Amino acid sequence: MRRFPDGFVWGAATAAYQIEGAVAEDGRAPSIWDGFGPILNGDTGETACDHYHRYAEDVGHLADLGVGSYRFSVSWPRVLPDGRPERRGLDFYSRLVDLLLERGIAPAVTLYHWDLPRALEERGGWLNRDTAHRFAEYSALVADTLGDRVDTWITLNEPWCAAFLGHGSGEHAPGRRDSAFEAAHHLNLAHGLAAPLLPGRKGITLNPHVVWGPDEAAVRRADGISNGVFEGPLLGGGYPSSVIADTAHLTDWSFVKDGDEAVIKAPVDFLGVNYYSVTVVEPGGKGKPSWPGCEDLKFSSAPGERTDMGWSIVPQGLTELLLRLSRENPGLPLVVTENGAAYPEPVHDDRRIAYLHGHLAAVLDAIDAGADIGGYYVWSLLDNFEWAFGYAKRFGIIHVDYATQERTWKDSARWYRDVVAAGALPGA
């Protein structure tokens, strides 16, 4: 067995819109995902996993897993609908936090996991600079409510997705196909404005792309578009000049105002890392709408086995990513805030166990090579609403029957419970 370091945090992760349901209860206002059209099978998050009413049961599952931390997100339109604090929504999260602590589980709160209030989208959303300031106000409200009991905060989850899937390809809400870089900048600014307002340990979760390919120039360009736009300003280096040059035909970056980059590089205590697969690029393609600035590149997947999402299974990509981030940001602890796989098997999910085993071994490889990695959160605790794929893709280690809301442990949940209890990876 290979042991993880003492103090390594084991966790499970979810997101509000993907599990809560109760979209019209207790004063919650619509988000950009409520009524968003292009979702497989016409699915919605109206009920999802009904976690809003079943949170106590779900905390019981977390306790039985033995995890030390639960990463969840707060629904912005539930606690601050139309700019007015909603006590019933705040009380829900307060009850959730209290129950977690009662069961010995540390809450890790994500403030934005893509459910922007629709009222703000109608005023321009992330293309409106003012939204960053509204996010800071919302963050302060949540911190004031939960800050006496929550020590770990994440401002944004995967701003690349919010910007480039929501404003590039349009496959995510709000479904726009322009101004992705402007949205990205205002998301970065939102983080910078909010982070100093949070107590305890604060960070941001990115989904850095591991870009592979035979052509160095193509890899450099795709890496800049996907990683440099966020890592550069957030971690203190500013927007890379190469990215600005590569996107000059798309934007003049005039939305970046004097002083913005100083705000964006607000100090963080850790960097959250979400990883699922790698991206392969080469010259001679037609690009992808979610990768503006890479219009002449061909995108493909690494060879080999894939998950139900069609994503190649490449554990060594996670090792490579963690070592790069560690090398480029010495002294900044890393936390794997999401990692997991979609498979359809309702209970006997050996392929998910193999995926998790391979990626936890990859984390250990990075630790052995000197990376400072403080924890790992499996994605996800429950099968849930998988955004544009609706309920067709199942990431949970616990199966959810959406007709009855019955929760059933998959084999992977039992396996993960045993890994957590041992603090070690079997057979590695």
Image: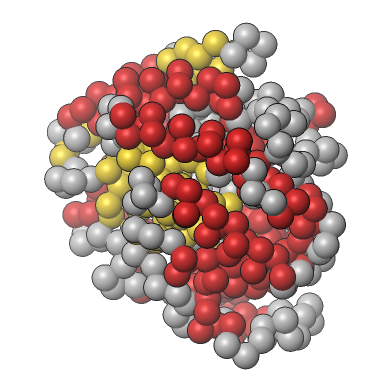
Query: Which residue is at 69% across, 24% downward?
Result: 47
Image quarter of residue 165: bottom right
Q: Is residue 206 left or right of residue 114?
A: left
> Horizontal and vertical percent for residue 284?
72, 67
Q: Is residue 96 left or right of residue 170?
A: left
> Horizontal and vertical percent for residue 35?
83, 38
Image quarter of residue 307: top right
Q: Is residue 371 visible?
A: yes
Q: Is residue 243 left or right of residue 118?
A: left
Q: Is residue 131 above or below residue 343?
A: below
Image quarter of residue 242: bottom right
Quadrant of image for the N terminus: top left
Frontmost residue, 161 versus 183: 183
Colour convention of the picture: secondary structure
Q: Is residue 230 visible?
A: no
Pick out the residue farthest to the bottom: 258
Quadrant of image for the C terminus: top left
Q: How many marks?
A: 0
Q: Is residue 213 left or right of residue 272?
A: right
Query: Which residue is at 54% across, 55% downward?
Result: 141
Query: Which residue is at 52% across, 66% downward?
Result: 194
> Horizontal and vertical percent for residue 380?
48, 33
Q: Is residue 225 above or below residue 165?
A: below
Q: Is residue 326 above or below residue 166?
A: below
> Horizontal and vertical percent for residue 237?
47, 82
Query: Which residue is at 75% across, 51% downward?
Result: 82
